[in-house]
Amino acid sequence: MAFLPKFDAGGLVTCVTTDAATGDVLMVAHMNDEALRRTVATGEAWYFSRSRNALWRKGESSGQTQRVIEMRTDCDQDAVWLRVEQTGAACHTGRRSCFYRRVERTEADGGARLVFVDADRLFDPDAVYRK
């Protein structure tokens, strides 16, 4: 059976990336055809940045790389799941995961607030990205 990803109108598929050892969700990103091909060919995670409109290899600026252990696709082949060996932090904020804030309901008004969890920084993004 062939891997025939179904790209959206922008030429992208959604990619969920998890830690292969723990199962923790590290990040959600997007891939175009070139990012998918490079990921398969190199065993390293490649993504497509919608904000920069550019292809990028995870860790090319920060050194926080992802070695792909397994790639899966969903039943429609319009999303992929990477199980990776993460070196350092996955998030551009310097945190291990992009999912470092829990959404909690506030009793008083029925709204919601953010609570930091697993929010320790593994690197200083200002120093790494020179912002």
Image (spheres, rainbow, N blue to C red):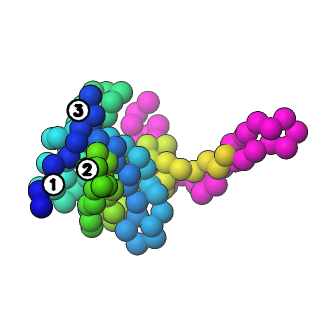
Q: Earlier in the sequence, mark 2 or mark 3?
A: 3
Q: Which mark is residue 11?
A: 3
Disc 2 to disc 3, how far (Cα)?
13 Å
Q: Position of residue 57 (x, y in %)?
A: 25, 46
Q: Earlier in the sequence, mark 1 or mark 3?
A: 1
Q: Secondary structure at mark 1?
A: loop
Q: Is residue 17 above or below residue 14?
A: below
The N terminus: image quadrant: bottom left
Residue type highlighted by circle 2:
Gln
Q: What is the quadrant of residue 17 in the picture?
A: bottom left
Disc 1 to disc 3, how far (Cα)?
16 Å
Residue at 28%, 60% in the rendered image: 72
Residue at 28%, 34% in the rendered image: 8
Q: Position of residue 107 (x, y in %)?
A: 85, 43
Is 112 left or right of 60, judged from the image as shown? right
Q: Are marks 2 and 3 in contact (CB under 8 Å)?
A: no
> Foreground residue, 23 or 3?
3
Q: Badge 1 is on which residue?
A: 3
Residue type highlighted by circle 1:
Phe
Q: Badge 2 is on which residue?
A: 77
Is 89 left or right of 106, judged from the image as shown? left
Q: Secondary structure at mark 2?
A: loop
Instruction: State which region is magenta.
Output: 104-131
